[in-house]
Amino acid sequence: MREKLAAEKQINRRTKKSNILDGQPHSTGSATPDGGYQTSDAARKAVYRAKQSLPNSPNKYAQVVKGLMKSVSPRKASALKAQGVHHETGLVVDGVIRSLQASLKELKNKRADRDRHIRKLLVSSVLVKKKYRKIRAQANMLGLPYGFVRNCTGVSVSEINRARKTRSDKIASNISQSVVEFYKQPDVSRELPMMRTVSKKTMEPRRVMEVSTDDAYRRWTEENQHIKLSAASFKKMRPKSIKPIRTQQLNQCLCEKCTNVMLMLRAVNSAAARYNFFEVKVKDKYDLVNLTLCEREHGNHSIECVERLCTSCGVKNLEKRFETLINKHGEENMSWLTWEVQKSNVTVDGVAKVRSRKVIAQKINTLNSLVQQLIHDADSLAKHLFVASWQHRQYSNLTRSVPLPANTVVMVLDFAQNYNCINQDEIQSAHWTNVQVTLHPIVTFYNCTNCTTDHTIQEALVFISDDLTHDTHAVQHFITLANSHLSEHRDVTIEKQIQFSDGCASQYKSKGAFCDLSYCRSENGFAVERHFFGSQHGKGPCDGDAGTVKTTVRQALVAHKVVVGNGKQIYSFCHEKLTKDGLCTNRQSFLLVPNDVIERNRLTRNVTKSVQGTRQLLAVRGLAQG
């Protein structure tokens, strides 16, 4: 009897000390029906022995436990579930959290108000409601700032479509658009035709500013005196594709007249700084011209002042400005740079010839001689800059007008620099025998014929040919193909055509080109007029389109995606990869012109008499044949 009571007391002591992991009522001393440990001490000791065999490192410990949870059998999984442990729950929750974090990160990179509200609503939907002490833990779990998660607690679905409150000092959209258009004016920035200046991501041609941002802001305020805009806001509105003047490391393809004036101004300013005559310095060519003209009226100088017919202004103002500096400098010689023609004797096939080329030369003379040359060039510089600005401004006003005049097509013509057909993994001897291909973009503007709303379509027609002769016959052939493309593939009715081009005599501005214009009405059935950009200021959208084509082909060559050796291969690649068809905004098409299809023996175009004063013409219109 005594032994029986002792055994019962021992069982009761074990029951009181029970500390089973599942928190269930205390076990009796009997074995569990599922084959578990009989007592809590046995279970505790088993856990201790298993813990001793696990690594101490937290990361290694987590990997081992995760591996054990993954490899359980179905019977063990049922046993774990009975103990309140779901081995798949952690994996599912981790996957959901990772997916949620990725979605929140994607929405964070978007700037639209709707995406911002959706991000807040998504966070609000997964928060544990009415347990605000857990917000910080949930923010850490989602990888979000605590303040952002706290602000998402009261977000509702109705806020998604709610418009964001507009600031009272917000700049109007028409002002922003006018600033962007001002930045794109030719006297403010110019388009770069080189391949290296085309953006590798957007394939958009870049522009570089001709003046500093401060000077651009000063000129914009003079033209828009009724608009209040700070200099900081003006600088922020500069498009990313237009780079400041300081970022241009190598200036090329510049106007000779403007460049020579800038080189002389640099020398004069250097002399002024030497004697501390800072009030004599002239910042740029535009300030130089403004010193010789009267004040602007309605944003423009008077045409009488530009043509030097006004008696109140003129280059005489420059003589007074530099008089003190000339007297101080005296007869001491100084040097400056200028571009000029250099002739050299060469022998070609045993025949002696004289060739001319433009070179930059150093001049050495007195400051007085330099100033006199600067005054002489400034006399014609005013009209030179006025014509360049005026022609580009008329082109911009016409192409940006919505819609264009009925049944009117605007074209911009220009030959690009020939493409040099090089290839990846090229051998040494092939470097000296590369084939060149002609590129001639024609950028067209016409009203959309498919949409009910009035808007203008810009389509770039890039002509590719192995014919390397750039003359009026090639230009006329390209224009004829462009007219056929618009009428047959775009269903455009042409009653009037306005063309813009540079003043190259062998291509657009000569007796042969004028003769082709005179036949347009009888051959095509509509009138054509051609306007010429200012001399050596003819940079336009054609240069950007050509640079984009060259850059895309060059990138494909480097990546071994294409091999080009002639115009047909370039056309096949561009037609497949770069054609933009079916869009109602910007389109791009490519047309192949074989080498032997351009007719150059046209009897009706054999004109022997030139038009007097051709270089002074700014526009021509075809009226009758001949």
Image (cartoon, helix red, strand yellow):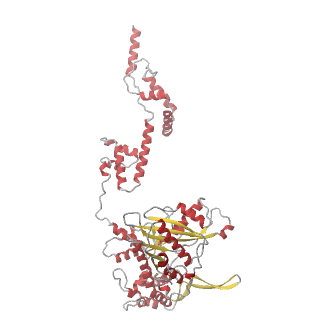
Residue 5 sits above or below residue 130 on the image: above
Tell me the residue at 31%/41% (across/down): 131
- Residue 491: quarter of image: bottom left
Q: Position of residue 63 (x, y in %)?
A: 50, 38
- In the rendered image, the residue lying farthest to the left is 168
Quadrant that contains the N terminus:
top left
Q: Is residue 173 left or right of residue 495?
A: left
On the question of residue 204 being in view, the answer is no
Q: Position of residue 473 (x, y in %)?
A: 56, 77
Q: Position of residue 135 (x, y in %)?
A: 34, 44
Q: Position of residue 492 (x, y in %)?
A: 44, 68
Tell me the residue at 46%/70% (across/down): 444
On the question of residue 493 being in view, the answer is yes
- In the rendered image, the residue lying farthest to the right is 350
- In the rendered image, the residue lying farthest to the top is 1
Between 513 and 505, the one lying in front of the other is: 513
Between 152 and 583, the one lying in front of the other is: 583
Between 444 and 311, the one lying in front of the other is: 444
Between 7 and 59, the one lying in front of the other is: 59
Number of disc labels: 0
Residue 463 sits above or below residue 312 on the image: above
